[in-house]
Image: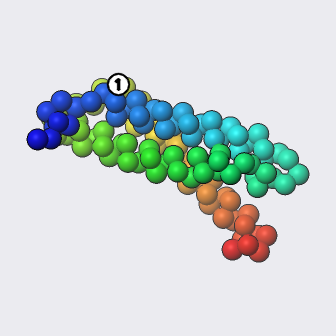
Amino acid sequence: MNTVAEKPSSAFPLWLLGCTALWGVGMWAWYANSHSKDGWSQTPLPWMLVLVATPFLCVVAAIALLRARHRSAQRLTWLDWCALVAGTVAVAVGALLLIMVAGNMRGMGIL
C-alpha cells in the first residue's frame, strides 16, 4: 500500500528547503574562495560536490512533493510554494555556475 498517497508528508518541503540551504552554504564557500589568486578552483572539493549534487536533489525532492500532493488531491501549501521557489533558484543558479566553470575550464584548455 502506498502511504504517500494516503497521507502526504510535510517532510518533502522541509527536505527541499534543507537541500537549498545546504546549496546556499556551498555557494557561500565557493564565493568566499573565488576571490583568491586561483579563483574558483581553490574551493575545497566537498563544497564543489555540494554545489553540483544538491540541485539534482532539489529536482528529486520537488518531483516527490508534487507527486505526493497530486496523489492526495491536496493543494500546495505556502510552505510547498516557498520550497519550490527556493529549489528552483538553486537549480537555476547551479546550472549557471556549471556553465561558468565549464567556460573557464575551456579557456584554460582543460576541456
Residue 60 percent across, percent down from the top left: 38, 48
95 or 65: nearer the viewer: 65
Q: Secondary structure at mark 1?
A: helix
Q: Is residue 81 visible?
A: no
Residue at position x 65%, y 41% in the image: 27
- Image label count: 1
Residue 25 percent across, percent down from the top left: 63, 36
Residue at position x 69%, y 74% in the image: 111
Quadrant location of the N terminus? Answer: top left
Residue at position x 69%, y 65% in the image: 103
Residue 48 percent across, percent down from the top left: 65, 50
Residue 93 percent across, percent down from the top left: 57, 47
98 horizontally vs 42: left or right: left
Q: Quadrant of residue 83?
A: top left
Residue designated by label 1:
78
Residue at position x 46%, y 32% in the image: 17
Residue 26, placed above or below residue 17:
below
80 horizontally vs 71: left or right: right
Residue 31, placed above or below residue 77:
below
62 or 82: nearer the viewer: 62
Outermost residue, right side:
37
Q: Is residue 13 visible?
A: yes
